[in-house]
Amino acid sequence: MTASPSDEKSSRRRRLLIAGGSVLFFGLFYLYVLFGVDPELFYWKEKPFFLTTLSFLKGFLGRPGGLVQYVSSFLAQFTLYGWVGAGVFTFVAWAVCLGTAGVLKAMAGRRVHPAAACFPAVLLLTAHAAYGYQITFAVALAAALGFVTLYVRVAPRSSVLRMTVFAVLSVVLYYLAGSVVVVFGVLCALFELLKKRRILPGVFCLLWASAVPSGYALTALAVGFSEAYAPLMPFRPGGAPAVSLLLRLPVGLLALPVYLLLAAVAAWLLRRPVTLRQRLAAFGADARSTPEAALSAHQSRVRGAAWTLLSLAVFLLATALLTFWSFDADMKKRFQIECYAQHRMWDRLLLEVQRLPSRLYDGYVMTDVNRALYHTGRLPYEMFHYPQKKGPPAIRLLTGLGFLKHAEVMFELGQVNIAQQKFNEALESEGPLPMVLKRLAQINILKGKPEAARTYLVALRDSLLHRRWADRILRALEVDADLSDDEELQRIRAGMPAEDWGYGGLGGAGYDKMLLGLLRPDKRNRMAFEYLMAFYLLYNDFEQVAVNIGRLDDYDYAGIPRHYEEAILVGVTRNPSLRVDLGERRISDETVRRGQAFLRDAARYDNASEADEEARYQELAAKWGDSYFFYALFGFSEPRPGWMFFRAEAVTGATK
């Protein structure tokens, strides 16, 4: 007797739904990561690096989790290319879900609904949306789930042998993937205690896996107990991960281990017994089995394990809602700014900053904004169209990312000695990042040290993404050790100072002296001039603005840039004896008219009652917040109403 066409059609439809629903889900996962999250932002946020050398690999082999970090670092390189990076993230999520399906099937004794196996991908997607995703953590978790499936399949019947196998697997897993061995131990303990009803192996699994990191901490001199249990996240090859990194995990990643444990218990509680006949029919062992019986057994196993149109629709809707709730648009804008700065997409950067929330506007962003304004020729004209405050126009932070921001500005200015110092500090603290190796190679070329440059280029040639650039520069050095055809290097070489201006922090008199030192060998160093004038504007140093205004003749400005005109008018108003030699240049009638109008509006603000003061301020900010007139009065700029990035800080500082 054969199965009816309707039964065959129903079975075929169910199989299509099982495969098709999951394919649809992961297809949408890929598209959302590609277009909604943008994997390239992950690359510039984490700055992972990977070298193909044996010495680089050895840096990961000496500590638990090193191999997973090594593999994760390799995979993370491809996030620089959006469509490939989205594929990497989707593959890792699929691997986690595949491992989850294996664990839940072991607990339930049959396939579970695909929604239960795919839900970890939803949690990973929320981490993507929150820009807190850590690929190392996800890869480690996938490894732990794979080891659970391996243990379930290979563990022998004997309790002693089962515990021996588990002990070996847990040690291997801890070496490969680090502290996720605890998750491995808990899942295996649940399998032993609930499914197999073996108390001794279950308790052993729980205790042994929990003790493995402690054993490592006791034997490793430089590792404490907290570090031994900390989750894997950074890509750096040196040192154990800090416990504080645990607090940086988004809710989705923190919830993943909890979900796996609860889902495993739920799968066991909701298991459905299968009759002996169905078991025999499924394996073809019943002599009396018929195609109908085999089909019945198969349907019994998969009836609760298939998507339906309704369940798929509900699951996708829930995924969309959770992802929407988790999405951090503010952080996306912040990382886009970093990405645009790295790619020197200055116009896009300035456009994106206009939509940046106040709480994310910091010294890093201000540095990128001023660089973008310079490179687009708008720094003397539109500097106060963006939030500014008293201080140098470049980053003051000297740790972490601050090293790189600081060094990049110094390199572009031509202050290569300071740039070299900061890039070396970044090399020590952040590792051999390709951008650091590239700049150090260029600096040594500028300083006439081609052999030292080759050292960095050879190291950079081992990078997956920068090998071609390094090979090209190495070939060029064989022909011309100075790289005379490189326009950027030639511009910087012309402005390299003869004196070494080594100063402490960026601030005070040292900053303008350093910039003046750059203008001595090359008076046409436009970036040094504009940053010097920006420094004087930010410190309300009208006398120095007047002294250096004559340097405009060294460049091709049409008239006097707007902010310089405004500063001269403010300076003369405050100090009528201030002497300003404009040469053949003149302050425009429009700027004079605007200056007079601002004085009238400012007088109304000064004379306002306490009750009207805030209203008068808002009127003043709405009309003049993007002018130097406004900045000179308040000590910060407010380019549009409500864009008060530095107002509270300025007011607090004024009251101290």
Image: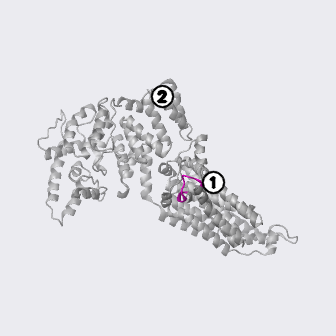
Q: Nearer the viewer, residue 653 or 598?
A: 653
Corner quadrant of residue 13: bottom right
Residue 231, percent from left and from top: 55, 58
Q: 10 Å neighbourhood of mark 2: few (<14), some, or many (≥20)? A: many
- Amino acid type at circle 1 is Tyr
Q: How is the image coloured?
A: one colour
What residue appears at the point 33 percent right and 29 percent down from the top-left corner? 498
Q: Can the viewer see residue 164?
A: yes
State the extent of the magenta-drawn residues as a range: 219-227
Residue 434, percent from left and from top: 50, 41
The N terminus, quarter of image: bottom right
Mark 2 lies on residue: 450
Q: Nearer the viewer, residue 465 or 315?
A: 465
Q: Is residue 584 left or right of residue 260?
A: left
Task: Give the mark nearest the N terminus, 1 or 2.
Answer: 1
Residue 44, percent from left and from top: 48, 48
On screen, 545 above or below 385?
A: above
Q: Nearer the viewer, mark 1 or mark 2?
A: 1
Residue 175 numbered mark, or none: 1
Total marks placed = 2
